[in-house]
Image (cartoon, rainbow, N blue to C red):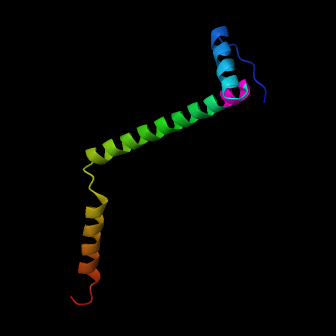
């Protein structure tokens, strides 16, 4: 897809020089920059979501998975252990 954007002339010149130095086209550099930006945004959103979940977990008195599953296993043994 073709897109037309207006860039600062100095910025375009710098991008063009760096693209030539790395033997790439300006298009390839812009595509890579946009892909990196999108990935960074997704990572930022994931981190924010994880932080929110951790805050909720702590606020609601969450416990470590090891402790939770240990209690669950003990309850299962107490309920279903045929030797009792």
In front: 31, or 18?
18
Horizontal relation, residue 16 to residue 63: left or right: right
Depicted 30 relative to depicted 64: above or below: above
Q: Residue at x 71, y 17 (%)?
A: 5
Depicted 36 relative to depicted 10: above or below: below
- x, y percentage for residue 44? 47, 35
- x, y percentage for residue 4? 75, 19
Q: Residue at x 26, y 85 (%)?
A: 81
Residue 13 in which image quadrant: top right
Most extreme residue toward the front is: 21
Overall secondary structure of the magenta section? helix
Horizontal relation, residue 64 to residue 19: left or right: left
State how many labels appear. 0
Which quadrant would the N terminus be assigned to in this image? top right
In front: 34, or 9?
9
Q: Residue at x 68, y 31 (%)?
A: 31
Most extreme residue toward the left is: 84
Horizontal relation, residue 44 to residue 60: left or right: right
Horizontal relation, residue 41 to residue 6: left or right: left
Question: Which residues fall within the magenta stretch?
Answer: 26-31
Residue 6 in which image quadrant: top right
In front: 43, or 65?
43
Most extreme residue toward the top is: 9
In front: 77, or 13?
13
Q: Is residue 79 magenta?
A: no
Q: Residue at x 71, y 29 (%)?
A: 23
Residue 73 in which image quadrant: bottom left
Which quadrant would the C terminus be assigned to in this image? bottom left
Most extreme residue toward the right is: 2
């Amino acid at each position: 897809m073709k897109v037309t954007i207006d860039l600062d002339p100095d910025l375009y010149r710098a991008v063009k020089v760096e693209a030539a130095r790395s033997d790439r086209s300006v298009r390839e550099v812009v595509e890579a920059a946009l892909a990196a930006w999108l990935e960074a945004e997704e990572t930022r959103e994931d981190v924010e979501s994880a932080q929110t979940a951790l805050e909720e977990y702590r606020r609601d008195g969450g416990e470590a998975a090891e402790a939770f599953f240990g209690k669950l296993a003990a309850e299962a043994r107490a309920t279903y252990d045929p030797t009792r």
